[in-house]
Amino acid sequence: MKRRDVIRNISMLPIAGAMPFASLSAAPTQAYSNFDPNTDLFSELGVTPIINALVTMTFLSGSLMLPEVLQAIQSTAHDFANMYELQDKAGAKIAEMLKVEAAMVTSGAACALTIGTAACITGNDPQKIRALPNLPGPPKEVIMQKSHRYLFDQAVRNTGVKIVDVTGAQEMEKAINGNTVMALFFNAADESSITHEEFVAIAKRHRIPSFIDAAADVPPVENLFKYQQIGFDLITFSGGKMIRGPQSAGLLFGRKDLIEAAKLNHSPHECPIGRPMKVNKEEIFGMYAALKVYLQKDHQKEWQEWLDRIQFISTHLSSIPSLVAETTIPDGPANAFPGMLISWDQGQVRISPAEVVKQLLEGRPSIFAGSRKDKLSIGVVLLKPEQVAIVAKRIKEILMKAMQ
Ligand SMILES: *Cc1c(COP(=O)(O)O)cnc(C)c1O
């Protein structure tokens, strides 16, 4: 549009004082589009809604946000906020709730690993923040136990560090040198050659920050307080797992100077390594609300509800000959909540657990279950109340059919 046209168009606008108030307050969607917000978008896009009868998985969109979280997002999404202020104030409140010096909301535990590591490398130095992951000089090093190496250490290596594997306290002690920037503990590793306490003590002795990844490690709720008491400098939990905040949210908390440095390595700053891992106010308010609910809720009652669900499904299947339904509670620390393993004599009920899983997934509604050790693995903690009976009924139908 030429400048002359702009001026002409402006002159055609009613003067401000004469503009009817009603037209100012009209919602843009109603005013300018026919979009119906009640459209079933799953169906419009041809995407199958899935019942998650297993555990939280990112590829299945994590967990379902609590109604309180959706409400917190709804009630805050209509106004702008200064994201620096919101991150600071929500972080201060979260830190108070978790009894730590400082906290922040990240876009997930994986983001926390990246910006937490970045914080250990750069501190508040703007030049280093800009330079990551290509700092001059020899690569910085992060110490991990060899048995703790896992897929998510990519999120640490994103910062350009080299991971140095150690086994046992002595090797850890020896591996620390002038290039060491951090020591990372993977809480849910199958085995550890160094205990949490030893790990923290060695790191402290050498003034190296220690970081623990406890992403999937609630319940129990006490774990949200446990690792700061042991002395870890940085701790992360996912927001979108059992805390049931937004899937694109996580918590990073611990030492104040490191959290401040992590913020400098994150959005809304424009150049740092964490800029593409943006959280907006929806994640921050949503994460804050989810944590508040999680800390307040009656965990015993919820646990009993899970056991009742298992009982319901077992009872529903009890007429299937040879069927055995076991309640399992993994030792943790990850996914330490009740689930079921269901098995049967495949001579009588002629179908394998893997085939049941396939039929559950292909049926409608589509149900995501698992098979383990030739048993059907069913999780109950992510089911909506009305889905418990649906899952029980579908399993029974499939098993009954296999007996015909
Ligand atoms: C899930 C998980 C992550 C990643 O968490 P997000 O919140 O999805 O980014 C990292 N580490 C461990 C051990 C996890 O279980």
Image (tube, helix red, strand yellow):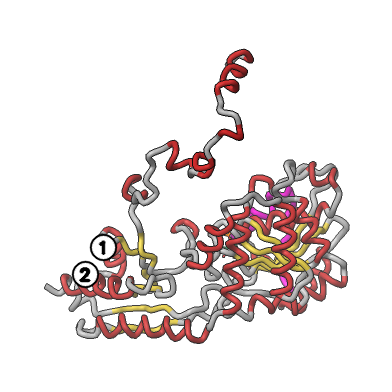
Q: Is residue 310 left or right of residue 349?
A: right
Per the image, label 2 sits on a secondary structure element best described as helix
Please determine whether, in this image, residue 238 is positioned above or below residue 275.
below
Query: Quick one: label 1 or label 2, which is nearer the N terminus?
Result: 1
Q: Is residue 93 left or right of residue 68?
A: right
> Magenta span has 158?
yes
Q: Which mark is residue 320?
A: none
Per the image, label 1 sits on a secondary structure element best described as helix
Q: What is the C-alpha distance between the residues marked 1 and 2?
A: 8 Å
Please determine whether, in this image, residue 327 is positioned above or below residue 188.
below
Viewer-closest of 25 and 14:
14
User: Where residue 158 appears, x then y in whole percent?
Assistant: 68, 49
**Amino acid at circle 2:** Ile
Viewer-closest of 30 and 281:
30
| Residue beneath disc 2 | 398
Viewer-closest of 196 and 308:
308
Hey, which quadrant is residue 343 in on the image? bottom left
Callout 1: CB less than 8 Å from ligand 1: no
Give the quarter of the figure containing the C terminus: bottom left
Residues shaded magenta? 150-168
**Amino acid at circle 1:** Gln
Please determine whether, in this image, residue 166 is positioned above or below residue 134.
below
Q: Is residue 94 visible?
A: yes
Q: Which mark is residue 359?
A: 1
User: Where residue 73 appears, x then y in whole percent?
Assistant: 55, 59
> Magenta span has 390?
no
Q: Is residue 256 left or right of residue 389?
A: right
Say whether marks 1 and 2 touch (CB < 8 Å).
yes
Q: At x 61% / y 35%, what residue is drawn?
A: 17
